[in-house]
Structures are given as structure tokens and as C-alpha cells.
Image (cartoon, helix red, strand yellow):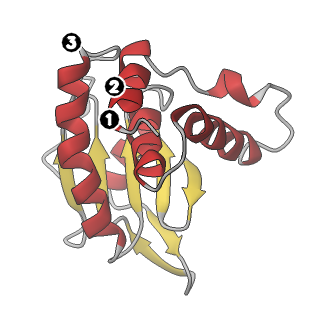
């Protein structure tokens, strides 16, 4: 799980499972430990049949499951996910931390967070670069180029360029 900015986290399947299981993280600016206010799942949950999942354990956690295919079924599927994901994140981040996750934390979840940055006026390529840099900064001692820590599907990148062209 990687902190992208105050109250906004990027994660993989295990991160999503932990957040739905009630894991507590410090909430900015107070630093108080709390369960996630929102979990956005962009992959099927659960992924594995031996891991039962009935929903969030903590009453404070709201869960939005919007699974999309990695690479998508065209830009339309991703655009629909963006249209529900951004309002959910905006609403839940006011109450605490929000986790956006997919199976690997490299494409679908990265692209939703990139959509948030683009909506604020950041160019698409800069949004992806910023996420990669923040992910790299959260991995001290790992010798890898930031750009190798994300792998957004071309369909997602194209959709963001169409939606948020400057």
C-alpha cells in the first residue's frame, strides 16, 4: 500500500483485503489511527475462493466494488468507472483515508488516481509520472526506475487524454 497524498492510498489486492478487514492507518492531519473511510475495488473481490469476504469489517468503511478488466473492454468501461469512482473518493476522503486498489496496483488503480490529478488540471503524462514518483518514494532502498512501478493500460491512458485534454 502506497500513500499518494494525504488520505489517498494506492494498493493491490492484498491491500484491499486488509483495508476491508479493518486495518487501521494514521489519518492526516491528526495522525489518529482509523480504519479506511473508503475502499474502491477495481478488481473482483475476493479474487481467491478460499478467502471469504462479506464486506467491510469496520462500520466506518464504505466499499465501492467496481471491477473492470485490466486493459478494459474499451475506453467506455474505464470512463464509466471514472464517473462513479471520483465522486466516491471525494465524498469518503472527507471522513478519512481512502484506498484505491486493483489486483497489482499498477494499472486500473493508478489510472483512477491519475484521473483525479487530471481533473485538477495536471496533464495525463504528468499525472502518471507523479504517481510513479510517489510510489517509488514509498519504497526506500528499492533500486528501480519509478516508471517501472506502474503499467497503465493504453486504453486507460487514451481515455484520460480524451476526457481531460488540455
Report the residue at 45% width, 25% height from top: 107
- Image depth: mark 2 or mark 3 in front: 2
Spot the residue most to the left: 54
Residue denoted by label 2: 159
Q: Residue furthest front?
A: 166
Give the vertical position of 124 relative to 68 (above or below).
Answer: below
Of residues 166 and 137, which is closer to you in this image?
Answer: 166
Residue name at image x 67 percent, y 47 percent: 134
Lower position in the chain sequence, tag 1 or tag 3:
3
- Residue 28 lies in what quarter of the image? bottom right
Mark 1 = which residue?
163
| Residue 37 appears in the rendering | no
The residue tagged 3 is 73
Residue 7 place in picture, x, y as percent: 48, 66
Residue 29 in the image, given as x and y percentages of width and height: 56, 83
* Nearest to N terminus: mark 2 or mark 3: 3
Amino acid at each position: 500500500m502506497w500513500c499518494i497524498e494525504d488520505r489517498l492510498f494506492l494498493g493491490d489486492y492484498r491491500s484491499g483485503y486488509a483495508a476491508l478487514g479493518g486495518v487501521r492507518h494514521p489519518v492526516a492531519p491528526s495522525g489518529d489511527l482509523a480504519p479506511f473511510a473508503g475502499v474502491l475495488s477495481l478488481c473482483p473481490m475476493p479474487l481467491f475462493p478460499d478467502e471469504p469476504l462479506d464486506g467491510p469489517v469496520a462500520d466506518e468503511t464504505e466499499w465501492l466494488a467496481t471491477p473492470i478488466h485490466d486493459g478494459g473492454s474499451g475506453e467506455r468501461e474505464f470512463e464509466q468507472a471514472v464517473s462513479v469512482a471520483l465522486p466516491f473518493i471525494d465524498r469518503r476522503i472527507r471522513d478519512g483515508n481512502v484506498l484505491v486498489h486493483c489486483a497489482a496496483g499498477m494499472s486500473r488503480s493508478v489510472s483512477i488516481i491519475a484521473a483525479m490529478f487530471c481533473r485538477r488540471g495536471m496533464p495525463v503524462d504528468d499525472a502518471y509520472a507523479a504517481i510513479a514518483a510517489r510510489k517509488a518514494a514509498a519504497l526506500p532502498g528499492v533500486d528501480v526506475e519509478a516508471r517501472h512501478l506502474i503499467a497503465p493500460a493504453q486504453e486507460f491512458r487514451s481515455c484520460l487524454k480524451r476526457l481531460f485534454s488540455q
